[in-house]
């Protein structure tokens, strides 16, 4: 982790205050003054600020139920930010592991641990995202096979990765995908001549959404670990 981030995570200082304290020589790493804020530090390094040993706060891992009409951004734009529902400190340090569109509801994972969220987002880890999808037209025959084989999205060279489609009723399906291209679910159905009219994410990996709309909770340790396999 960068030294300025470490100082922020272990104090109440803002990033610019932390950088200032580093520049003026208030910060020692393993007994040496370090004035470069981009210096990498590790858990076993001893970092002192004016002689006081710093201990970085642990990372935060949150599951939230996103309401419709909110955006997965740290600031309000055309719609209010989802983060308005999150009454925790240093919200600006948090990010969402796999954004949802403004009109999509359901599960979002929020963290300040970039390595952890990478495991969720990268297609290489094949982390499952489960969506309940409402469609404008009845699902056509043979769609489960087409989604399994991969769909050619407009503007993309490669087919989508194999996806699992379960029919709930003629206009409602459960779709499980392991990647997260821009508007992926809507584009997959558009590519087969249908249209998504409602979209709700029910689960990511082994974690199922179990909080009410607009509510959130911290993940348990085992839930956190389940994404690091
Ligand atoms: N796919 C979409 O099209 N939209 C979302 O919000 C999530 C997945």
Image (cartoon, rainbow, N blue to C red):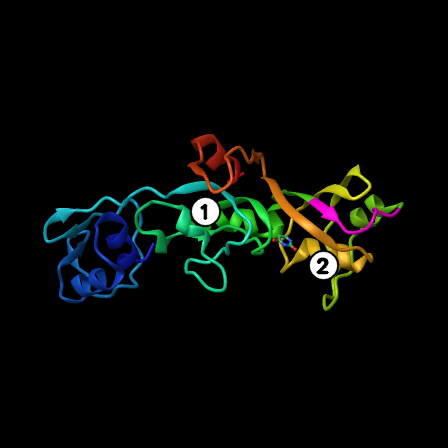
Q: Report if residue 220 is visible in the image.
A: yes
Dots 1 and 2: beta carbons under 8 Å? no
Q: Residue at x 13, y 66 (%)?
A: 24
Q: Is residue 37 left or right of residue 101?
A: left
Residue matched to label 2: 187
**Among all residues in the image, which is located at the extreme bottom?**
155
Q: Position of residue 36 (x, y in %)?
A: 24, 66
Q: Which residues are magenta?
A: 133-140
Residue matched to label 1: 110
Vertical order, 14 against 126 (above or below)? below
Of 60 and 71, the residue lying toward us: 71
Q: Position of residue 47 (x, y in %)?
A: 20, 50
Is disc 2 surrounded by few (<14), some (14 to 19) or many (20+) residues within 10 Å? some
Q: Residue at x 56, y 56 (%)?
A: 102
- Distance Cα–Cα, label 1 vs label 2: 25 Å
Q: Is residue 37 left or right of residue 93?
A: left
Q: Position of residue 216 (x, y in %)?
A: 44, 39
Vertical order, 102 against 46 (above or below)? below
Q: Quadrant of residue 164?
A: top right
In the picture, the disc for residue 5 is none
Label 1 vs 2, first from the N-terminus: 1
The response on whether ligand 1 sits within 8 Å of label 2 is yes
Q: Residue at x 46, y 58 (%)?
A: 73
Q: Is residue 197 left or right of residue 44?
A: right
* Magenta-span inclusion, residue 138: yes
Prevalent SS, magenta region = loop
């Amino acid at each position: 982790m960068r030294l300025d981030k470490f100082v922020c995570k272990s104090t109440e200082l803002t990033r610019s205050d932390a950088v200032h304290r580093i520049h003026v020589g208030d910060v020692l790493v393993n007994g040496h003054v370090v004035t470069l804020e981009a210096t990498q530090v590790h858990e076993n390094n001893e970092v002192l600020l004016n002689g006081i040993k710093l201990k970085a706060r642990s990372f935060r891992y949150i599951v939230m139920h996103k309401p419709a009409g909110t955006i997965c951004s740290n600031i309000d734009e055309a719609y209010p930010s989802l983060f308005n529902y999150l009454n925790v400190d240093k919200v600006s340090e948090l990010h969402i592991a796999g954004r949802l569109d403004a009109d999509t509801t359901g599960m979002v994972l929020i963290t300040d641990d970039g390595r952890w969220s990478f495991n969720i987002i990268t297609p290489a880890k094949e982390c499952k995202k489960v969506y309940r999808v409402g469609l404008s037209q009845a699902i056509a025959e043979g769609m489960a096979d087409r989604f399994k084989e991969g769909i050619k999205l407009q503007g993309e060279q490669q087919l989508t990765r194999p996806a699992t489609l379960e029919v709930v009723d003629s206009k409602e399906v459960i779709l499980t995908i392991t990647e997260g291209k821009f508007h992926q679910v809507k584009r997959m159905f558009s590519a087969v001549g249908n249209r998504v009219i409602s979209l709700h994410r029910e689960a990511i990996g082994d974690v199922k959404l179990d909080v009410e709309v607009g509510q959130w909770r911290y993940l348990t340790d085992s839930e956190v670990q389940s994404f690091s396999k």
